[in-house]
Amino acid sequence: MSEQVRSLTQLLDRASSRRFLEAPLTEELGLAEELPFPFLAIVGQTEMKLALLLGLINPNVDGVLLIGTRGTGKTTAVRSLAGLLPEVDRSLCAYGCLPEDIEGGGLDEVCPDCARKYGEGQPLTYRDRVQLIELPLNSGLDDVIGGIDEHAPMPRRMRLRRGILARADRNLLYVDEVNLLSDEIVDSILDAAAQGSYTVRRGGTAASYRSRFLLVGSMNPEEGRLRPQILDRFGLRVLVRGLQSKPQRLEGYRRAISFRSNPRQVIREYALSTESVRAELQNAREALPKVELSRQAERFGLNLIKQLGIDSLRAEITLFEAARAHAVADGRLLASPKDVRAVAPMAIQLRRSAFMKDFFRAQHKEQQELDRLLKDQTARTGSR
């Protein structure tokens, strides 16, 4: 791109809005190679794409949930993130020891071998790309959390194998049709996501695994509601609607058919823009610790949440962390009210509960009645 782009959001808007030329048809060779649709080739759906990018920049937004009917690009958008995923530091140790463990709790927080390496100045980590880990809908509990390794080299000695949640550590965990998961799978994801680690016990054998991941889910509300417990674990919630304008729908059709006909040609068309966005994401992720909230941004967000009557403190966590990510995506180290305003719809919606509102109203009425009875009884008996 010859013209200089000043921010991630500018690059995203420009790459996604340009007209795409249809690729020529090619012979289908029956290859099973996975070729995800380019993220930047998705037409429209700005809020959905922005939410996913903010999650990659700052995992502290606590996940992204995409809610919409079939055919609106939810699954395509998530899988297309493969070309944009940043790099992270991964442990070289089988126990998952990291330098941050030592920085937070001292040498006793890591294994003896890593403590020795740290003292000698040897690296404890290596750089690796974040991976997109999908949780199949038909997964069993042992698939998710891990279980007995039936292919262990020593049959008489029990060994545990890692589950999907352990493999998702420091990666992106995607759950399609998250509202259709069984209760036991939902509970295991909730525990692992909340604690950042979990323990598997089988007989006399136990193993603990780290599970620090960005949780991304998608669902069609026509197929069933999502349990409040799992909904609460998604920080950003995006209502994904179909494209409204005829030109956008026509362009979406052209890109979809072109990709089916010649996916490599389409991927090449967006290769330069994709690499530019990936680099911007990496830079934004590394600069995020320096980003602060302005006093005006804090007041704006707190007043908004108070006026909406939202009880959960997770609203502030998601709102302010998303605002910080939005600011650094535009190359700024101070988040302003405009950043809070930009992310507020996806960070705050679906947080008010009609059930809890009615429940507290009924309890308040009961409390008033109880206070009145106690006051009357005290006046009659003269007790103090």
Image (cartoon, rainbow, N blue to C red):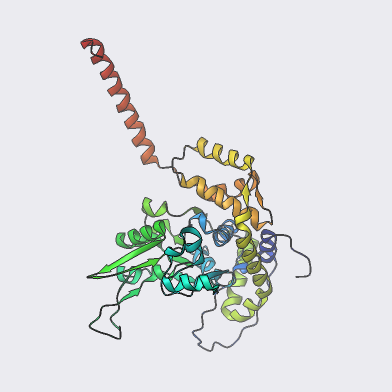
**Camera-side residue of 175 and 282:** 282
Question: Which quadrant of the view contains residue 271?
Answer: bottom right
Q: Left or right of 365: which side holds 211? A: right
Residue 65 in sight here: no
Residue 171 position, x and y percent, is 49, 68
Quadrant of image for the N terminus:
bottom right
- In the rendered image, residue 69, in percent from the top left (x then y), is placed at 47, 59
Residue for point 42% across, 60% down: 196
Q: Is residue 120 above or below residue 331?
A: below
Q: Residue furthest right?
A: 2
Q: Quadrant of residue 368?
A: top left
Q: Is residue 286 left or right of residue 170?
A: right
Q: Is residue 93 visible?
A: yes
Residue drawn where x is 50% and y is 74% of the image:
117
- The residue at the point 65 percent across, 67 percent down is 277
The residue lying at 42 percent from left, 56 percent from top is 221
Which quadrant of the figure contains the C terminus?
top left
Residue 193 against residue 156 in the figure, above or below: above
